[in-house]
Amino acid sequence: MIFNKIIKNVKYYLLVFIVLFVGVFLLHNLLDNNNALEQQKIEQKLKEEHANAINSAKAGLQVYATIVSSIKSYTKNEATFPDEYQLQKYLNDLLKDINFKDSILISHVGIDHAFKYVITPNQIDPKKLKGVSTKSFISKKKIAALDRLMQSEDIELFPPINLREGWAGFPFDFSARNNKNEILGYVAPVINVKYLLDYFYENNDAETYVHKFIVNDSIDFTREAVHNNTEIFNATEDAEYYKNFDVKDRDYIYSSIQLFGLKLRIGSAYKVKPLVDKSSTNIAYAWYALISLLVLLSLYQFLKNRALNNSLHDANDLVLDKNKALEGNLLKIQTLIKEIHHRIKNNMQMVSGILLMQEDEYEDENIKKALRDSQNRIQSMSLVHEKLYANATLKEVNTKEYIEQLLMYVEDTVKYKALELQKEIVIIQELYFDGDTSSDLGLIINELVTNSFKHTFREGRNNKLRIEIIKEESFYKLIYKDYGKGLADNFDFKSAKTLGMQLITILTEQLGGRLEYNKSPDSTFIIYFKPLEKSFKA
């Protein structure tokens, strides 16, 4: 049986563990999905920033392309190919609404790759390159590419270079031709990278994101320099150079732009990669652990209470069985007690009957009165047993009914037929005393009433009797009035010789009370008493 209970409890624990396991699995998936969503938001912000970076780069390069296209149209459509002063004037007119300052220079190089002239918006040949051959510092590969370019109508964007002027630039080269379409060499507008990237950084969140710019998948550049293993003529470093930040290559996202034959690759990443806030996840797991603990504790308490209830139920069943057995025994005992009361009552009535028979044998009136008094006393006690026999509790006697019946019996025994008696009994209906107390009170009242019939009540007189029992603090008070002339002034209860008065005194003491007598205004006996047992309702 104990083993079965253990198996049954294990079943409940197993079920709860399964539910908790499923719950933590669902919670884990939910939190993972939430974290994945947060990660997607972080990645989406980077993608948006990267898209903005690409658009900014395209916009800046398009501005460059427009400037270079305008210069190409100007050189080709003039009546004669412009000299350095004419080109400088045109350049200033072209750039008057653009804040390029010294961020552009234009070189005219002949077919022999020697500089014809070099201009900026404010200077002519600032580095004295006129007449210098580009072959002295440009690779043969690029010279060959320039030779091919002179035969083409296209504009070609070459990789950025470090200029001797101290800044990094984007060379946009195209064939130099006059209005007769004669090849005169090539024109190389070089536009400052710094302008392009300043334009780029102003339109993007540079505090949060880092960007890298790579040409042809091999050369990276910044606003200040091109990192292509050539000499850098600028001592200033770009604070936003991606190598200044500890960002892994895998954290970048890349896009490429094809412009005038040049592949520009742009990468974007967080300077400090945001982490998904795990505090809510940790709190959720902590709460789930707490709830799981409370569930297990509740289950433990439930099973414990159920086991206790089962034990109490078993104990209650046992008590019910015992109570049924006791009730059976009690019924037998009550039957026996009723039988005892019945037999005592019958025996007392038999004794009373014997006394009544003996009364006829004597002529002496005093003997007859003594026998009659004894008969009344026995009858008062017999009446108590009769009441107990008829009562379901076998312990309590209704005081008012008992005294009313007692008075009727005394009247039938001692009063004269012509004697009229007015009775007033003031006792609440709910007053009950146990058998011993009722017996003592009955004997006292029997003696008082008998005494009144002997000495007070007369034919032709207004005979009146009042019996009252009231509760007064911790005592009960029996008040008896017969409205007669009363006892003698010097009457002493303690020294009284009559059996009746002696019985009244003894029974009063037995009830733990005291006896008082008032002659005026009415003859009144007052007996204070305490019930022998509190088996009544007041």
Image (cartoon, grey):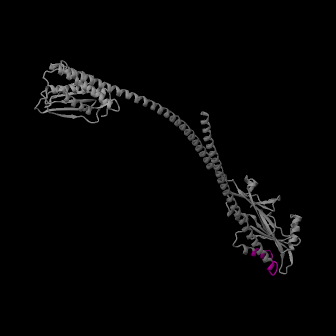
Position of residue 255 measured from the top left corner of the image (x, y, whole percent): 75, 62
Residue toward you, 44 or 1? 1
Q: Is residue 80 visible?
A: yes
Q: Which secondary structure dominates the residues rendered in magenta?
A: helix
Q: What is the span of residues highlighted in magenta in the rendered image?
A: 76-90
Above-or-below relation of 91 to 380: below
Q: Quadrant of residue 257?
A: bottom right
Q: Is residue 361 left or right of residue 282?
A: left
Q: Position of residue 435 (x, y in %)?
A: 30, 27
The relative height of residue 216 versus residue 391 in the rendered view (above or below) is below
Q: Residue at x 29, y 29 (%)?
A: 386
Q: Looking at the picture, does residue 19 appear above or below residue 339?
A: below
Picture quadrant of residue 179: bottom right
x then y, percent, for residue 276 = 66, 52
User: In the visual, does 68 lie left or right of 436?
Assistant: right
Residue 89 lies in the magenta-colored region? yes
Left or right relative to 74: residue 487 = left
